[in-house]
Amino acid sequence: MKIRWLLKAERNIEDIADYIAQDNQLAADETIEKIRRGAEVISQHPYIGKQGRVTGTHEFVVMINYILVYRIKNNQIHILQVLHSARQWPGGF
């Protein structure tokens, strides 16, 4: 299935990269790459994520600290948010 990153998810990616890069640019690049690879796994196996805490969503743990929140809509996977596991969820999209 095709992946569509919603604006909030793209902003989450930028914020994560900026935060990690303050200490280590290589670690930031590697983290973002792992998150994007996680989305590719979802594209191949859309129901791999557990049922989300928000109705109609799924959650896929990409790394111990990062969760992709997504919805399957119109034969596409919409990545809604990239959350740090310590962040309170649910929240607004």
Image (spheres, rainbow, N blue to C red):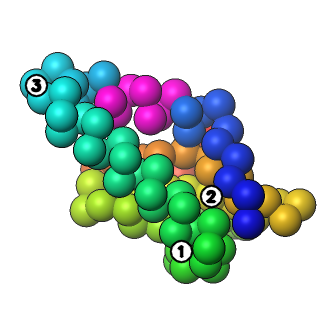
Q: Is mark 2 on a helix, strand or loop?
A: strand
The label shown at residue 23 is: 3
Q: In this image, 88 relative to 63: left or right?
A: right
Residue density around tag 1, few if under 14, some if 14–19, many if 20 or more, within 10 Å: some
Looking at the image, is mark 3 or mark 1 earlier in the sequence?
Answer: 3
Circle count: 3
Q: Distance between the residues labelled 3 and 2?
A: 29 Å
Identify the residue at image location x=61%, y=78%.
45
Looking at the image, is mark 1 or mark 2 earlier in the sequence?
Answer: 1
Q: Is mark 3 on a helix, strand or loop?
A: loop
Query: Label 2, on which residue?
Result: 70
Q: Quadrant of residue 61?
A: bottom left
What main secondary structure does the magenta stretch of the protein show?
helix
71 or 24, nearer to the observer: 24
Q: In this view, does 55 lie above or below 17?
A: below
- Type of amino acid under label 1: Gly
Q: Where is residue 2 in the image (x, y as percent from the top left)?
A: 73, 58
1 and 2 marks in contact (CB < 8 Å): yes
Looking at the image, is mark 3 or mark 2 earlier in the sequence?
Answer: 3
22 or 2, nearer to the observer: 2
Identify the residue at image location x=17%, y=20%.
22
Q: Quadrant of the N terminus?
A: bottom right
Q: In this view, does 92 lie above or below 71?
A: above
Closer mark to the observer between disc 3 and disc 1:
3
Which residues make up the magenta segment?
11-17
The label shown at residue 80 is: none
Q: In this image, 8 relative to 4: left or right?
A: left
Query: Label 1, on which residue?
Result: 49
